[in-house]
Amino acid sequence: MKAINIKWDTDGDVDLLKQLSTEIELPKDMTDVNEISDWLSEQTGFGHEGFELVY
């Protein structure tokens, strides 16, 4: 599964936003949306304002 169209919260830092991927492959055992949300933030150090999941 993959998180796509991730909308990162960079406090308006456009240069930083360009450096962050909008797609990230997720661990195979991860299915809970809240867990995925937390994992994305932990992996990058940035919060987000939403994402989509594709299988």
Image: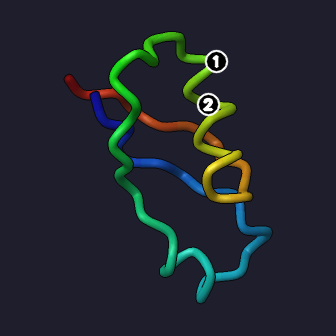
Furthest-top residue in this view? 32
Q: Which image quarter: residue 28?
A: top left
Q: Is residue 39 left or right of residue 28?
A: right
Residue 50 coordinates in the image, percent (x, y): 56, 37
User: On screen, 49 above or below 31?
Assistant: below
Colour mapping: rainbow
Along the viewing direction, whichever of 49 and 23 lies nearer the viewer: 23
Q: Is residue 24 left or right of residue 6?
A: left
Residue 18 coordinates in the image, percent (x, y): 49, 80
Q: Which image quarter: residue 11?
A: bottom right
Near mark 1 (Cα within 10 A), the count class, few <14, some 14-19 or many ≥20, is few
User: On screen, 18 above or below 3?
Assistant: below
Residue 25 coordinates in the image, percent (x, y): 33, 43
Furthest-left residue in this view? 55
User: On screen, 3 above or below 12?
Assistant: above
Q: Mark number for residue 34? A: 1
Q: Mark number for residue 23? A: none
Q: Quadrant of the N terminus?
A: top left
Circle 1 sits in a helix, a strand or a loop, which is it?
Answer: helix
In the image, what residue occupies the spot 59% across and 42% down?
40
Q: Which residue is mark 2?
A: 37
**Is the Cβ of the residue at disc 2 closer than 8 Å to that at disc 1?**
yes
